[in-house]
Image: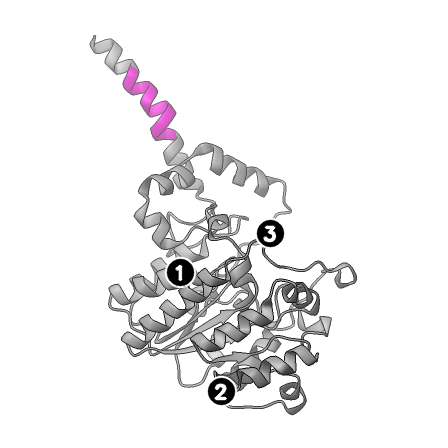
Amino acid sequence: MKKFIAIILVYCVIFTVIPAVFCAYVDPYNVMHPLSMRDTGVEPNKNFIKMTYILENPDKFDSFVFGSSRVGNIHVENIPDEHCYNMTYSNGLPKEHLANIRTFVENGIVPKKIYLGVDSLSYTSDPSENLIGYRMSYEYLTENSFEFFKNYLDPAVVGRAAAEVMLKEKTKEKDNTKFYEYGWNSDYNRKTKYDFKNAEPSIGTVMRMDETLSEIAEIVKVCKENKIELVVFTNPMHHVTYKASLEKDYIEFLRRLAEVTPYYNFSGYNDITTDDKNFIDSSHYTAEVSDMLIECMCKDKRYETLYEQGFGWKVTQKNADEFIKLLKSQ
């Protein structure tokens, strides 16, 4: 009997413990050592890493930028009079931002200001699509330990990720200093090989406008209750993506958003969004463009020609009809 038990224990070690240790060591998504991220060749789980980092350093920043990867090139160090961190993560949605902000508040992290970037992706992307290795939210993983271990200690999951890396060209180890200090994705003068002549729109496949607006309204409520200044803005969208967004009732979303909260608008057809040089691809604008957003929101700068095209407007309930009329005239 003892021999049988010993054999069972050996098999348990071979088939459970050793694979789990291997997965934790490889850790392609960087969830096992979020405070010392490595370049594994796989996109890291930025939501989990950044939330862990902020919770471990609660007094380091006094403001945050929330949004999908589209806010990823906003250089927060250029925001005056604030020590801001960019919380950008892949396909980040208002539902996840709300959960993150609540977690901050529950843990005594009450920033003086939050910037929230939204666009058509905010209501055409299904949150369930984020239940994959590099997108799972901090709250989903901490509240569902089974899912955590299932996704990050499963040899099949880690094996697939490792296989993807082996098929890629090797890259040099990256410096993560900027990731932890600022949170943004790429610097100025970013070169792109994207084929804009054959650009495809970057937009989701569902319609959950009611839910998204409700989630944004809840963010407004949480910020108001905790005396956090909330600055909502729309991301500049490449004209191909913007055109597709119009077919997904984007103007209606903007009209209803004004009923929930004032916001700065940077979307629409304008000299920024119709010029390919201002984008890395059909989804992401450059760091140079992000500086223009900062100047409009934080320095009250107005680019007159662009303003006439709707870029930089602060939309409120009072001027929403005028603003919507402008967009429709385009």
The quarter of the picture where residue 231 lies is bottom left
Please tell me in which quadrant of the rendered image residue 237 appears: bottom right
Foreground pick, 306 / 15: 306
Name the residue that disc number 1 marks: 50
Q: Amino acid at mark 3?
A: Thr
Instruction: From the viewer's side, name the closer residue of 102 and 165.
Output: 102
Residue 177, compared with residue 169, is above or below; it is below
Q: Position of residue 140 (x, y in %)?
A: 36, 50
Answer few, some or many: residues within 10 Å of disc 3's Cα (few below 14, many 20 plus, some between 14 and 19).
Answer: few
234 with respect to 25 (left or right): right
| Magenta region, residue range | 8-18
Callout 3 touching callout 1 (CB < 8 Å): no
**Among numbered discs 2 and 1, the one appearing first in the sequence:** 1
Q: Amino acid at mark 2?
A: Lys
**Residue 81 among magenta residues:** no
Sequence-wise first label, 2 or 3: 3
Which residue in the protein does label 3 denote? Answer: 171
Identified by mark 1, the residue type is: Lys
Q: Residue 87: which quarter of the image?
A: bottom left
Residue that carries the numbered disc 2 in the rendered image: 318
- Please state the horizontal and vertical placement of residue 22, each as a whole percent of the image: 41, 35
Q: Position of residue 29 (x, y in %)?
A: 46, 48
Quarter of the image with the N terminus in it: top left
Q: Crowdedness of circle 2 by 10 Å Cα count: few (<14), some, many (20+)? A: few
